[in-house]
């Protein structure tokens, strides 16, 4: 798999991974699969991919994070993992998940 990806940028690797994935992936899973050092870097790339996908043949699908305790669903202006629920103050948060699919 590495030889297939070796000449791609990190962002291109993320796009290809999310296009080929059968299930939505978290930033942590993306980080581990691609060997990216920090999860924060993955979120930075995902934000750029979301913006640039408006002009591409694909779209980034974001499964919003939610509180596992009270089921509060977060609204995201910037793609990130929330740290605490505003409703119940729990830190038991299901992180956002991502897929890329072709536009219809």
Image (cartoon, helix red, strand yellow):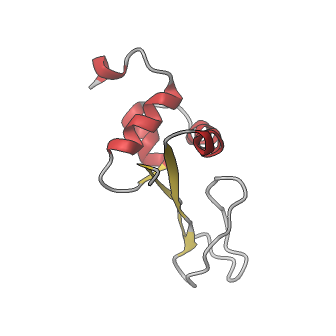
**Residue 73 vertical position relative to residue 36 in the rendered view, above or below:** below
- Residue at 33% from the left image edge and 47% from the top image edge: 21
Place of residue 31 in the rendered image (x, y in percent of width and height, measured from the top left)? 46, 39
Q: Residue furthest front?
A: 104
**Residue 11 vertical position relative to residue 39 in the rendered view, above or below:** above
Place of residue 51 in the rendered image (x, y in percent of width and height, measured from the top left)? 66, 43
Apparent side of residue 78 relative to residue 72 in the rendered image (left or right): right
**Residue 81 vertical position relative to residue 18 in the rendered view, above or below:** below
Apparent side of residue 86 relative to residue 12 in the rendered image (left or right): right
Task: Quarter of the image for the N terminus: give it.
Answer: top left
Residue 65 found in image quarter: bottom right
Closer to the camera, 39 or 101? 101
**Residue 64 vertical position relative to residue 37 in the rendered view, above or below:** below
Task: Quarter of the image for the C terminus: give it.
Answer: bottom left
Closer to the camera, 79 or 89? 79
Count numbered badges in the picture: 0
Closer to the camera, 20 or 57? 57
Apparent side of residue 6 relative to residue 88 in the rendered image (left or right): left
- Residue at 51% from the left image edge and 49% from the top image edge: 59
- Residue at 49% from the left image edge and 41% from the top image edge: 57
Residue 64 found in image quarter: bottom right
Place of residue 28 in the rendered image (x, y in percent of width and height, measured from the top left)? 47, 47
- Residue at 46% from the left image edge and 37% from the top image edge: 15
Place of residue 54 in the rendered image (x, y in percent of width and height, measured from the top left)? 62, 45
């Amino acid at each position: 798999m590495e030889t297939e990806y070796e000449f791609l940028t990190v962002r291109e690797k993320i796009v290809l991974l999310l296009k080929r994935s059968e299930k939505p992936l978290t930033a942590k899973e993306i980080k581990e699969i691609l060997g990216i050092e920090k999860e924060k870097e993955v979120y930075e790339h995902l934000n750029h991919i979301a913006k640039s996908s408006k002009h591409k043949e694909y779209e980034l699908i974001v499964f919003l994070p939610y509180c596992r305790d009270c089921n509060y669903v977060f609204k995201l202006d910037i793609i990130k993992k929330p740290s605490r629920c505003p409703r119940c103050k729990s830190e038991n948060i299901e992180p956002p998940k991502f897929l890329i699919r072709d536009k219809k």
